[in-house]
Image (cartoon, rainbow, N blue to C red):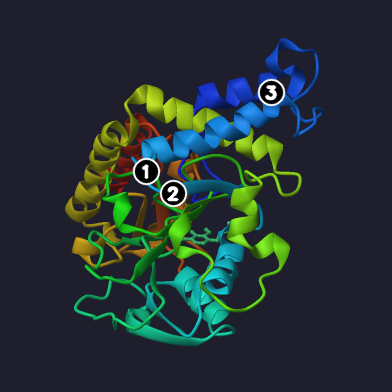
Amino acid sequence: MKKHNFSAGPCILPEDVLKKASEAVLNFNGDNLSLLEISHRSKPFVDVMEKARSLALELLGLENKGYKALFLQGGASLEFLMVAYNLLQKKAAYLNTGTWADNAIKEAKAFGEVLVVGSSKDKGFNYIPKGYSIPEDVDYFHCTSNNTIVGTQMKTFPKTNVSLVCDMSSDIFSRQLDFEKFDLIYAGAQKNMGPAGTTLIIVKEEILGKVERHIPTMLDYQVHIDKDSMANTPSVFAVYVSMLTLQWLKDLGGIPFIEEVNNKKAALLYTEIDRNSLFKGVVAKEDRSTMNATFVLTDENLTATFDKMCKQAGINGIDGHRSVGGYRASMYNALPLYSVQVLVDVMQELERTI
Ligand code: PLP
């Protein structure tokens, strides 16, 4: 039986996508060649890349609006650097909502002045800072929509005239947002989109070309736009599986459909965390993530029993991040509501057993 996979990433993918991906590894397009053996310049793969890029824009409602979608390598971590390389001329504003935002800030500091306009570091990033303001003279404002590690999520984004840049690695395609507010969005594939190995970048082309520094070829967004994400050999497998997942999402009804399911899953789990006195949530309630729910046992002595019960129920990947501890149940798009019910059942069973 397949496990209930709450892993934070790499994580669960739709079963149908995994089947199609494994078929393509053996025989792609019925052509008796593996997807992994064909040239990335061949028409079948060029079509895959084109489709992946257009599905990403379509699902976000950003077609024909001056945006380009790119599938690059280096993970979201390379984007911390590329964003600053391409956009930071003098000064940028950053919101520090977690370890990943912190890493983005560290990288940006090599390129110019970085104003941290708000931070929740004082409380272990267990809330989203509010009431901060963004100066008008910054090149852009950078934020992280979802803190994968601690489990907070930005529910609103600031109204500002400056370019909004967002790391959406752990909640892209999970909820409806006014994506047109953002000039640049990036996300590692390995949570809501596909396997590790590719990063989606959505960029409004008009914001590029404004910094004076020389940008190395492979770090230059414009180069990747001009070469249709094929400036070098792309991650063919990761792009193909991402394309399949985006098609899966489109066929289901797109972001509006999945958002409803995601809200149901989150409500089910958080309701149990709040009801069951053996568990306690770790972040501010209003900032709770629908993707990564973090919680602890109120009595640590129950850890071994709870862990054993989870294992017996086929639950995988709910250990908290190594820097935080406790538990983290990641409920990305492909996780069925039923898996959350299984976890809730185990939490209730623990209550009955002790
Ligand atoms: N940003 C966020 C919000 C993440 O959750 C992660 C990884 O989990 C990263 C960035 C780093 O991504 P990558 O491993 O693709 O560099």
Label 1, on which residue? Answer: 62
* Count of numbered circles on the image: 3
Kindly identify the amino acid type of the residue bearing the numbered disc 2: Tyr
Task: For mark 3, give the secondary structure.
Answer: helix
State yes or no: Cβ of the residue under disc 1 lies below 8 Å from any atom of ligand 1. Answer: no
What is the distance, in whole Å, between disc 2 and disc 1 at their CAs?
7 Å
- Is 186 situated above or below 91? above
Q: Quadrant of residue 282?
A: bottom left
**Dot placed on the residue nearer the N-terminal end, 3 or 2:** 3
Residue 16: percent from the left, percent from the top? 52, 21
The local secondary structure at tag 1 comes to: loop
Residue depicted at x 58% and y 26% = 18
Determine which residue is flagged by label 3. Answer: 44
Nearer-the-camera pick, 274 or 177: 177
Q: Nearer the viewer, residue 306 or 208?
A: 208
Q: Which residue is mark 2?
A: 67
> In the figure, 293 relative to 313: above or below?
below
Q: Measured from the top left, where is residue 313 in percent x and y?
A: 44, 35
Label 1 environment density (alpha carbons within 10 Å; few <14, some 14–19, many ≥20): many
Residue at image point 56% right, 59% down: 76
Q: Tell me residue 349's x, y (percent).
A: 30, 40
Q: Is residue 1 visible?
A: no
Q: In the rendered structure, which amino acid carries the disc numbered 3?
A: Pro
Give the Cα distance between marks 3 and 2.
Answer: 24 Å
- The three-letter amino acid code for the residue at tag 1 is Leu
Between 275 and 229, the residue placed more toward the observer is: 229
Mark closer to the chain start, 2 or 1: 1
User: Residue 234, percent across and down?
Assistant: 71, 44
Q: What separation in Å lies between label 3 and label 1 (alpha carbons)?
A: 25 Å
Q: Horizontally, is 108 left or right of 121 in the view?
A: right
Q: Earlier in the sequence, mark 3 or mark 1?
A: 3
Q: Is residue 163 left or right of residue 76?
A: left
